Amino acid sequence: MHQWDATSLITCAKFQIGNRLVLDYMLDAGSAVISRQVQQETVDAGLVGGYPDAVMIKERIDAGHIEIRTVGRMSAPFEEVLDLYGLQEGDKAVVRLALQSADVVATVTDDRLL
């Protein structure tokens, strides 16, 4: 299972190769999961803003190609480390999901801090 951060997911939902979204090529490579926070950033906020990539992501979620997971906070000392890095809530959720889900084998991100 591959996990996605918001920026990478949005980028893959914006661009096409051979009249096919890059996102669909990526989904062909394996199952995908995102945190509830990433869904809020990419779909919920994107639909409000009228972004077409939000519609593309939502369609794949609705079709069951992208799984949504809720992740809990971790220990206070670990959360303090995440805060020290200055990560946004969505990025913190990406780290939490990677550490809390045994089936997540890779994280797709373009964020150097992650």
Image: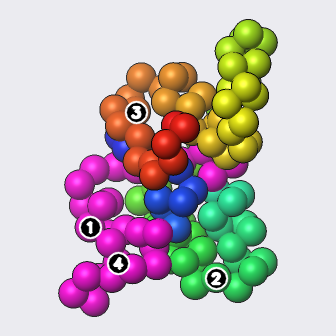
Residue under label 2: 51
Residue under label 3: 104
Q: Is residue 61 left or right of residue 107?
A: right
- What is the quadrant of residue 96 in the picture? top right
Residue under label 1: 25
The percent position of residue 83, horizontal first and vertical second, equals 75, 28
Q: CA distance from mark 4 to mark 1?
A: 7 Å
Mark 3 element type: loop
Q: Amino acid at mark 4?
A: Leu
Mark 4 element type: strand
Q: Amino acid at mark 3?
A: Val
Q: Residue at x 70, y 77 (%)?
A: 47
Task: Report crowding for label 4: few under 14, some 14 to 19, many 20 or more residues within 10 A (C-alpha).
Answer: some
Q: CA distance from mark 4 to mark 3?
A: 23 Å
Task: Report crowding for label 2: few under 14, some 14 to 19, many 20 or more residues within 10 A (C-alpha).
Answer: some
User: Is residue 99 part of the magenta span, yes or no?
Assistant: no
Q: Amino acid at mark 1?
A: Tyr
Proximity of marks 4 and 1: CB atoms separated by less than 8 Å: yes
Q: Nearer the viewer, residue 77 or 50?
A: 77
Q: Which mark is residue 21?
A: 4
* 71 in relation to 91, above or below: above
* 26 in relation to 24, above or below: above
Q: CA distance from mark 1 to mark 2?
A: 21 Å
Q: Is the N terminus in the top left, top right, bottom left or bottom right quadrant? A: top left
**Does the rendering let one see residue 32?**
yes
Q: Earlier in the sequence, mark 4 or mark 3?
A: 4
